Amino acid sequence: MKTNLFRKKTDRVVTKKKVTAPGRARPFPFFNLLLTLFFWLALAVFFYSGRLMRPVQLVSGQQAPETVFAAVDFSAENMAATQQKQRLAQDSVLPVFTVDMTAIENARNVLTTNQLTQLIPGDGQTDMQAVIFTAISNAVSRGIISASDKQTRFNGAAPQGKVTLRGPKTDTIRMIDSFLQQPDALKEAVEEVLRKLPREKRSEETVRALIAQWLWPNLVYDAQETETRRQQEVKLVNPVFETVSSETVLLRKGATVNEQALLWLAAHEKRLSELETEAERIQRLAGSGLLLLLGLAMIAAVAGIIEPALLRNRRQVLLLATLSVLPLVIGKGMLYATVNLHVLPSSVIQFAMPLAIAPMLASILIGGAAGLIVGLWVSFALATLLGGSYEVFLLGIMVSCAAVYTTRDVKRRAALFRAGFWIGTVEVLVVLVLAILGKPAWTTLLPQLGISMFFGLGSALLAMLLIPVFEHLFNVTTDISLLELSDLSHPLLQSLAINAPGTYHHSLMMASLAQNAAEAVGANGLMLRVCAYFHDIGKLVKPGFFSENIQFSENPHDELTPSMSTLVIVSHIKEGVTLAKKYKLPQVIIDGIEQHQGTSLVSVFYHRAKTQQKEAVSGQPAINDEDFRYDGPRPQTREMAILMLADGCEAASRSIDKPTPARIANLISEIFDSRLRDGQLDECNLTLADLNKIKKAFIFSLTNMLHGRIAYPRMDEPEAEKPEEKETNNSELPPEMK
């Protein structure tokens, strides 16, 4: 039964990655070629199939670089005439005033019967109070004006001598002369009171003194309401248009660009777009499309020089195409909002282009080279969209370099905001340089500076939101996600610490070893640390069959045949992959689980099987070493190769009786030579120089990990020579079991 089971397992064919012979160029994948052509065609149609949209690149205040003539007749707004019409409409709105009625309320609360006793003795005070209050109310509600306000017409606020008096229900238009001054209002109020008094009680001085305190100028100018009404009236004014004939000079070289010239240029571009025929549109589409194709070919050539493997990776090419579509679509929308909807001023459109988002995402998801490549392409495409703007192309290159440099080692999401700040700073510096050359007005320069910093920070925020989306869609793992997985409180790692403590300790030591070696050769140390944590999680299924977890119990392999022991040992790879997928670990960790042993030989059981065959009866089939190997694949990257070497060296170092630097160095050299002879490093891109650096890093790390300690005597025993304790040595087991 055991033999049959083993035969079923060994019938599987070990697949190996096909390696191209050195010096022979690998062909460009046909899928990537089709994807590139489709992407180019869709982009050309999306960019240029509609009406001509070209923003005016000049800004108010700068000097015109060339003389511009009108190619066709067109209609444009006459700003001077429109502004004159708006001023007339604004002046037609009368100033708004309100009447302060506070005096009436004060009189109601303060005027008492005692004050009226001297006028009407006996029981008539109540009626007299109503008479006086009515006289005060009539005078106050009509509005009282001071002599200076009447003379100066409220300091020029009412130059026409008329005002709008705002009432509780309706407004009335009043002449300034219709308002009473304080002396006249007081005189009328006193006369009204005196007419109601008995003849013998009519004391003008007493009445005047009684009500004079409530009558003061009470017209209040409502500046806010007046301005609101004037702005509403201005909005109702239709612009004044004039016809500009062809061959008219729209802008003269060296002249200062003003708002009227910008309106002419925008109207001229709009008219050209309206007059464009279908044949001209197709011609423009073909010419611009070919320009994009040349740019795409140039970018592909650059990518082939600095990162040739990138063009042959289907998933990464598709990811780069998707990343480049995002800013191009946003840029097209911003151009439409500027030219057609007039939401953005044309002076800021080139600095509002989303030049940083694609290189930021590409740098974080794939690498710095990919970030530069996609940044160069997006800069060229958006510059072409804006009519060949070299400012946009220059700005895009600078922003791409800043984005790649600041995101080359992003491990925390908060670091993206720092990257966004530096990207915005680079944009601001480019704006200042262009301002020195173009000399725009401050009213134009300040919005350009503000929007440059805003879009730099906005790119970082958008990247933070999109990173998890692209990680999920394209099965990519960033350092940000790896750092989250490096938390040792992960359920799998906690289970490993409890159920397989020896494996857990081995994984921690191996993580430190691999990360130090990765830093020596410029590999991804964080990736190696996380992969080392999880590489042996498959041992959770049968932890007692691996030597690092065997403490004082019997070795279970003593009861198994070499083939069955090999099957148990090798199965931890498959079990680890199953657990990794169950807990939704990223593909890079699954690769580490599958490749950390490669197709190496389970040597102890292979030699045990050969020994047993020699001792057995002759006639049995020869032992095939392929039956005692892991399924692989072999390490495909230098990170996976370092992981394999770290696993073997850390496990083997436990078998050294008295670790010294020389013994550690010899052991590591033997393991490296063994892996090289066995072909385990044939499919990764490690050089001999890299291997030498890794070896030195391993020797340094293991020497410090395995350093000795002074044996301190116990306090309750004499300082005499003690017999050495017998140490458990399981060196007969292979490194892959430890």
Image (cartoon, rainbow, N blue to C red):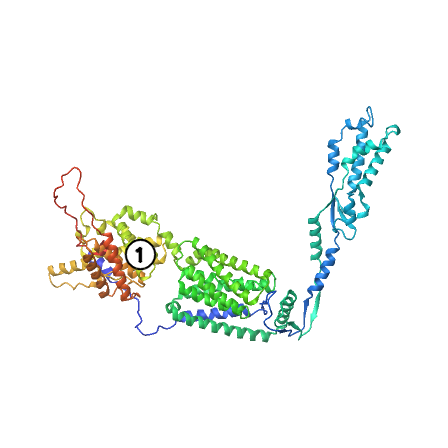
- Horizontal side, residue 402 vs residue 121: left or right: left
Q: In the figure, is residue 235 to the left or right of 508?
A: right
- Residue 690 against residue 138 in the figure, above or below: below
The percent coordinates of residue 310 (x first, y second) are: 39, 67
- The answer to whether residue 113 shows anywhere in this view is no
Instruction: Say left or right for 10 vs 88.
Output: left
User: Could you tell me which secondary element the residue under label 1 belongs to?
Assistant: helix
- Determine whether 738 is above or below 76 in the image: above
Residue at 79% across, 45% down: 147
Q: Position of residue 107 (x, y in %)?
A: 75, 34
Give residue 559's position: percent from left, percent from top: 17, 51
Q: Residue at x 47, y 70 (%)?
A: 38
Task: In this rendered view, identify the residue nearer to me: 63 or 602.
Answer: 63
Q: Residues within 10 Å of mark 1 (few under 14, many from 20)?
A: many
Q: Is residue 299 visible?
A: yes
- Which residue carries the number 1 mark? 515
Residue at the spot 71% in from the left edge and 57% down from the top edge = 236
